[in-house]
Amino acid sequence: KAGVTQTPRYLIKTRGQQVTLSCSPISGHRSVSWYQQTPGQGLQFLFEYFSETQRNKGNFPGRFSGRQFSNSRSEMNVSTLELGDSALYLCASSLVASGSRNTQYFGPGTRLTVL
Amino acid sequence: GENVGLHLPTLSVQEGDNSIINCAYSNSASDYFIWYKQESGKGPQFIIDIRSNMDKRQGQRVTVLLNKTVKHLSLQIAATQPGDSAVYFCAENISGGTSYGKLTFGQGTILTVHP
């Protein structure tokens, strides 16, 4: 099976712009979670989507949003970019079957640089 | 790397030695735990997991130990190889309810294996 894919891999934006990142989960996986990784804060949970619904949200401002499509692919959007949004954005997918563990498998990430 | 700013714990070993990486988790309600390995420029890679109804689980060259009394996890790597050099993260999860899709990560440990 192909792993989690994320596009683009690298992105450079300027303050005030907005950005959309894309994630394709492992085939058959129904849950997609997003994380932000920075040197100062480590890996932090942004939100999780399942069946096109946001089930859980981390402690991030409303500028960070996401959605999930019927094929389980997900996008996240950051509006009004700030310098502090520079980070590696990671997407992870999990199966979500009855009795299954919540094992999340990660993509390679999108490196966002805000200038 | 992604976590330099956090002043991560480091572990330096010789090739062939056994390595032990420790992690203290935060939430006594967590009932599922995962160890990930992250190499430079890549997303976290699943190594091994354990549910809270177990104290020990073994994989290929790796063993995870869970001590719920003191909220402590450890990852043991046997016969460590240079290819094991990476940052290792523990992650905790509450498998029920709305927290299903959220992993809470530790700060990570940098493992360096010298040939």
Image (cartoon, coloured by chain):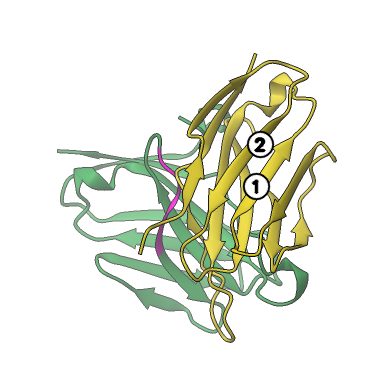
Chain colours: A yellow, B green
The residue located at (34%, 61%) in the rendering is B76
Please tell me which residue lies in front, A24 or B108: A24
Cα–Cα gap, marks 2 and 1: 7 Å
The residue located at (80%, 46%) in the rendering is A59
Question: Can residue A43 be seen in the rendering of this structure?
Answer: no
Please tell me which residue lies in front, A105 or A76: A76
Marks 2 and 1 in Cβ contact (< 8 Å): yes
For mark 1, does the 10 Å Cα neighbourhood hold few (<14), some (14 to 19), or many (20 or more) residues? many
Which of the numbered marks, if any, corresponds to residue A20? 2
Q: Is residue B53 above or below residue B33?
A: below
Q: Earlier in the sequence, mark 2 or mark 1?
A: 2
Could you tell me the amino acid type at mark 1? Glu
Q: Is residue A34 above or below residue B28?
A: above
> What are the residue bounds of the magenta stretch?
B42-47
For mark 2, does the 10 Å Cα neighbourhood hold few (<14), some (14 to 19), or many (20 or more) residues? some
The residue located at (76%, 75%) in the rendering is B97
Q: Quadrant of the N terminus of chain B?
A: top left
Q: Quadrant of the C terminus of chain B?
A: top left
Q: Position of residue A50 (x, y in %)?
A: 68, 66
Q: Position of residue B57 (x, y in %)?
A: 39, 76
Could you tell me the amino acid type at mark 2? Thr
In this rendering, would A2 be left or right of B34? left
Q: Label 1: which residue?
A: A75
